Structure formats: C-alpha cells, structure tokens
C-alpha cells in the first residue's frame, strides 16, 4: 500500500496510468466490431475521450519541465548525446505547447480553433522528438557494440574466423563470400543481442520509442496501421514507462 | 523556474492549482452573471469550470488509499483526542473518495444502475463529517495552547497590561470576553499553521452545508470560500512550516 501511495503522489505516474488505460480502451474498442457490442463500444470511446482530455489537463505545465530538461542536457559532455537530447527536449516542449492549445480549444477557452491543424502540428513535433530519441538509442547501442567487439577480440587474440565486413571482400557473389556474409551478420546480431541483454535500460528505452513511433506515424498518415495496432503499441509503451517509474534503475540516463 | 517544476510535479500541487482555478471561475461566473455584454466570457468560464471539475474527479481515483494510509498512521498517535479526531476524519475522507469514485464511474458510463442522488448525498455527508472532525481537532489544539499560555506568567503580565490600557472596554458587561479574545488572537498569531488550517476548514464547510441543505448560500459565497481554502492549500504545500502536524 505504501508503494502505491508514493507512486500515486507523482503526477507523471498518474498520467502514465491514464495513458495505459486510454490505449487499452482504444485497443478494446477496435476489437469490438460486431453490432451487439455497440453500447460497450460507445462507453469505451467515451471513456477514452474523457481520459485524453484529462491527460491534456494534467500536461498543462509540462512545457516548462521539457525546457528545464533541455537546459540541463546542454551541459552534457558527449556532443552527439548533447545534440540529440537537447533538440528532443525542445521538440517535446513544442509538442506540449501545441497540446495545451488543443486543450484550450477542446474546453472552449479558444472559440475558433482549427483542431485538426493543431493536432497535426503537435504530432509532427512528437514524431521529431521520437526520431531523435531513437537516434540517441542507436548511438548508445553503436558505442556499446563497438566496446563489446573490442573486448571480445582482445579476449581471443587468435580467432579462427576474423569477422571481415562485407565491403572488404571482392564483389563477386560466390557461395563462399555469401557464407561469410551470413556469418558476419550472425555475429553482429549476436553482439547486439548480448549488449541489449546486459543493458536493460537501453533495451527498454529502444522498445518504448519503437512502440511510440507508430502513433504519430499513423495519425499523420505516413504509415497507417489502424486503431488496434496503435492501441496495442500505446499500451505497451505506457506499461514499459510505468515499469521505469516503479524501478528507477531501469531508466536510461542521462 | 525550478521550484515551479518541483511543485507541479507533485500530484497534490497540480490538484490544488486546478482547484484554485475551478473556484476562481465559479466566483467569476457568479459575479458576471448579470452582465449581458460578457455572456461569451461567462460561457467560456463555465465550460472551463466543468472540464476542471471532471478532470479533478478522474485524478482523485486513487486517493482513498492515501486516506486509509493516513488513518493507519494517526491510529498510532499518543494523544487520545487527536487520535480519535484524525482517524475518524481520515476514514470519513476515504469513504468520501470511494463515493466520489463511484459517481465518476456513473458519469463516464461504466456503472449504470445506481441512484446518483443518494450516492452524491452520501459523499457530501462523509466530506462534511471529515471537515467537522478536522475542525474539532483545530478547536482542541487551540484550547490546549490557550490553557498553556494562560498559565504562563509573562503572558499574564501582558494580558493585565492590555486590559488596564483599555479600561472602557474592560468595564463592559462581559469583561472576560475581552481577555478571552486577546488570548485567542495571541494564540492564533503565534501558531499560524493552526490559524490557516482552521480558516481552511471553515471555508470548506460551506460547500457540504449548501449541498446537504443545512445552510443555503449562493454560488458566490461557495466560490469565494473555495478559492480561499484552495489558496491556503497551495501556501501550506509550498511552505512546509505552515502545514499543521500531525
């Protein structure tokens, strides 16, 4: 009970729980396609809209938090991380600002608001932020894979099959070169798998961002996947972020 | 900017801000209700108030557990009166939250066959009872401090000085009233947390009194009282020394 109370006291935690519930409703609504469940579907979509509006209310001050996070990430030592994280936080701040305008429009504070235009704008900023987060994940993964590969070659000085990258080989595609290509690919995948298995925060962040990216891709019409898939992705990423809140060691730093 | 971020990252901080905004809107709507050229603004403020109220109801969904935890803590207090008042207040607050959650479920459509009026009345009753218990605790704490002070020699000197300074007041039919009021005001001045908590509880009391029909007041009074109590709530959250303990 005590851990629930502490969890509940954090505003962000509540927002994540509502996000999970909202996407669960979206998933449920998309699975109930027959006519008998029309009543349930209406209730579920009403609940989803209510949660979405309340989450917008809860996010009213988040632009400031994102700007503060951007101010902190400017001081990072690694230049790639500094670039990715600062721009990602700035994009998130713009996303929250658009989201606040949408909330004002939905509650009636701003009377004539082009909701579709502002919604598209907010999803664009969200997409940029997610792309930058994924770039940061790929960069961290690349650094860790290089380190792992170096430590492996230093442990085994006389390895029987040295993994040569494919572009060093002649362009003729004989069965021997194809076998070496596949072998190299297998070894790289094994390396990536080992690195991700031993770095749960990176794995969690990668999976979370990959799930999240389908939402703006669908809403902007770039890669439409349908409400069910979007709901499932949203639910998965919300559950993962709740997990990082309950176990703070799972959060990727910085 | 940093203290603002720290404040809003607490769930309670955000809820207090929304409550302040909600009651400010309610008061503004009441004040502008007869103003014909501000009808647009009044409509906007009304819709903002409803959306804030609905959002806050959703945000209160887990709070019954908080109150039960608080009740578990107050059951272990050493002072018997405090233990009784605070535990009963927390249990009553938990029951209020449960009724409120049921009403939310009805408003969203998750539960259908419940008597909304009965549940709304019960939630007001539990809230009213918890406020009465909190006020009893305030009165008990004030009386304790007052009895301690009246025995203090320095204070007796100051009170005698005050009474002799204003002889025309002291000779009034109830001379003891002047001394009592002086003692009360001195107590409240030296214990600002007690004063703020009492004012907050008294202001909060007007809402259930109106809902239960015990003391009908208009929307303006309720809006004003709600605004005052929300502002006090924000102040006690930002200045921990002004928060009453336990």
Image (cartoon, coloured by chain):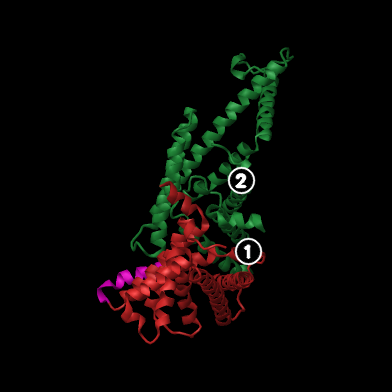
Instruction: Say which of B124 and B104 sits in front.
Output: B124
Q: Which stretch did the figure color magenta?
A: B35-48
- Specify the subunit that label 2 lies on: A
Chain given the colour red = B
Chain given the colour green = A
Instruction: Say which of B165 and A232 sits in front.
Output: B165
Q: Mark 2 points at which residue?
A: A244
Q: Determine if the magenta segment contains residue B131.
A: no
Q: Residue furthest bottom?
A: B173
Q: Determine if the magenta segment contains residue B39.
A: yes
Q: Is residue B73 left or right of residue B47?
A: right
Q: Report the residue at 41% width, 62% height from top.
A: A106
Quarter placement of the N terminus of chain A? bottom right
x, y (%) of residue B181? 41, 76
Q: Mark 1 points at which residue?
A: B65
Q: In this view, does B137 lie above or below A3?
A: below
Q: Is there any visible trace of residue A203 in the rendered image?
A: yes
């Amino acid at each position: 009970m005590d851990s629930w109370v502490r969890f509940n006291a954090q505003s962000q935690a509540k927002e994540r729980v509502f996000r999970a519930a909202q996407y669960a409703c979206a998933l449920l609504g998309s699975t109930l396609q027959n006519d008998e469940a029309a009543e349930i579907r209406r209730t579920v979509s009403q609940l989803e809209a209510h949660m979405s509006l309340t989450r917008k209310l809860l996010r009213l001050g988040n632009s400031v938090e994102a700007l503060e996070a951007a101010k902190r990430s400017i001081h990072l030592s690694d230049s790639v991380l500094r670039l990715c994280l600062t721009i990602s936080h700035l994009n998130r701040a713009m996303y929250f600002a658009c989201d606040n305008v949408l909330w004002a429009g939905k509650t009636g504070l701003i009377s004539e608001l082009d909701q579709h235009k502002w919604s598209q704008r907010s999803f664009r900023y969200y997409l940029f932020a997610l792309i930058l987060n994924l770039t940061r994940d790929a960069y961290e993964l690349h650094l860790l894979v290089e380190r792992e590969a170096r430590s492996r070659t230093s442990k085994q000085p006389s390895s029987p099959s040295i993994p040569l990258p494919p572009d060093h080989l002649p362009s003729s595609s004989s069965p021997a070169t194809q076998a070496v290509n596949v072998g190299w690919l297998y070894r790289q995948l094994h390396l990536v798998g080992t690195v991700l298995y031993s770095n749960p925060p990176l794995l969690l962040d990668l999976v979370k961002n990959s799930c999240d990216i389908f939402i703006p891709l669908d809403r902007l019409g770039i890669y439409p996947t349908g409400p069910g898939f979007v709901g499932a992705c949203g639910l998965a990423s919300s559950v993962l972020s709740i997990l990082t809140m309950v176990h703070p060691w799972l959060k990727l730093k910085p | 900017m940093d203290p603002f971020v720290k404040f809003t990252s607490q769930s309670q901080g955000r809820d207090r801000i929304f409550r302040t905004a909600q009651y400010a809107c309610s008061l503004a709507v009441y004040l502008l209700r007869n103003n014909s050229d501000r009808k647009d603004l009044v409509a906007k403020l009304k819709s903002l108030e409803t959306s804030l109220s609905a959002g806050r109801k959703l945000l209160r969904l887990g709070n019954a557990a908080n109150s039960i935890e608080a009740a578990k803590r107050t059951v272990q207090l050493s002072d018997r009166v405090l233990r009784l008042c605070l535990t009963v207040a927390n249990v009553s607050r938990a029951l209020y939250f449960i009724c409120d959650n049921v009403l939310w479920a009805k408003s969203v459509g998750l539960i259908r066959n419940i008597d909304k009026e009965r549940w709304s009345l019960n939630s007001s009753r539990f809230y009213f009872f918890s406020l009465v218990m909190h006020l009893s605790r305030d009165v008990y704490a004030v009386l304790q401090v007052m009895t301690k002070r009246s025995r203090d020699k320095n204070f007796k000197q100051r009170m005698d000085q005050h009474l002799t300074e204003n002889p025309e007041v002291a000779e009034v039919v109830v001379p003891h009233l002047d001394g009592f009021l002086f003692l009360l005001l001195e107590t409240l001045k030296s214990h600002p947390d007690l004063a703020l908590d009492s004012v907050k509880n008294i202001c909060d009391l007007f809402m259930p009194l109106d809902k239960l029909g015990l003391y009908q007041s208009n929307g303006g009074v309720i809006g004003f009282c709600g605004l005052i109590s929300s502002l006090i709530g924000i102040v006690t959250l930002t200045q921990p020394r002004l928060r009453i303990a336990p």
